């Protein structure tokens, strides 16, 4: 759901991956055999403690890849592409595509494309989880914006990624 994933992804981009989309894409897309069961607070490594506390309430949980899956015939599981199955067949509700300008959030049950949440969006912004509100014809559905500006990164930011191909990071 966007209200869970966007804060983690926006913060990870800024702090853990230091605004390097290629490194972030490699970690989230290329380094896992299949996909993610859970995105965890380990993505918040390097973020200011106050921001981590605001996002998690002090809770911590690990990211878990779907590397433990076993197929019915015992063969190794493989990553499926959008052309293998429809989102409906896989019970997928959301898709996240990492672009140089931000994260495209797609309500897979309603549209094939979605609005892009800019990488500079404050990770404490509250987004709607109502799939019908994530329309490609409208801006991202913000429920509430934070009152205080997000802390700045202590480390210098790397140059923004240019010409990095978008990587789908679909999530159930």
Image (cartoon, rainbow, N blue to C red):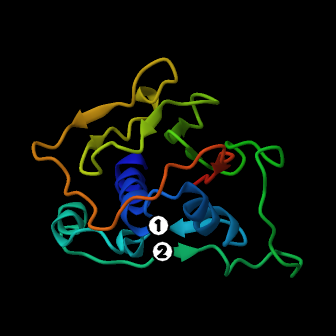
Residue 69, how many percent across, how many down? 70, 77
Which residue position is annotated with label 1? 39
Residue 73, how many percent across, how many down? 89, 77
Residue at the spot x=35%, y=69% of the render?
Answer: 44
Query: How packed is label 1: few (under 14 Cα within 10 Å), some, or many (20 or more)?
Result: some
Sequence-wise, the earlier of marks 2 and 1 is 1
Q: Nearer the viewer, residue 17 or 40?
A: 17
* Residue farthest toward the left in the current orientation of the protein: 147
Left or right, 117 with reference to 78: left
Image quadrant where residue 112 sits: top right
Residue 106, how many percent across, how many down? 55, 37
Asked if the residues shown at circle 2 and circle 1 are in contact, with their CB atoms under 8 angstroms apart, the answer is yes
The alpha-carbon separation of the residues under discs 2 and 1 comes to 4 Å
18 up-or-down from 124: above or below: below
Residue at the spot x=50%, y=39% of the render?
Answer: 101
Q: Quadrant of the C terminus?
A: bottom right
Left or right, 127 with reference to 66: left
Residue at the spot x=78%, y=51% of the render?
Answer: 81
Which residue position is annotated with label 2? 63
């Amino acid at each position: 759901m966007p209200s869970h994933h966007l804060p983690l992804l926006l913060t990870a981009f800024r702090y853990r991956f230091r605004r390097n989309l290629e490194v972030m894409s490699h970690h989230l897309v290329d380094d896992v055999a299949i996909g993610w069961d859970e995105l965890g607070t380990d993505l918040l490594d390097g973020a200011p403690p106050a921001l981590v506390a605001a996002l998690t309430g002090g809770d911590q949980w690990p990211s878990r890849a779907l590397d433990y899956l076993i197929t019915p015939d015992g063969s190794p599981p493989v990553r499926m592409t959008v052309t293998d199955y429809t989102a409906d067949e896989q019970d997928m509700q959301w898709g996240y595509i990492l672009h140089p300008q931000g994260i495209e959030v797609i309500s897979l049950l309603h549209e094939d494309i979605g609005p892009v949440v800019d990488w500079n969006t404050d990770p404490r912004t509250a987004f709607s989880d109502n799939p019908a509100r994530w329309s490609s014809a409208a801006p991202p559905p913000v429920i509430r914006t934070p009152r205080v500006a997000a802390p700045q990164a202590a480390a210098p930011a790397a140059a923004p990624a240019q010409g990095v191909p978008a990587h789908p990071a679909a999530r159930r």
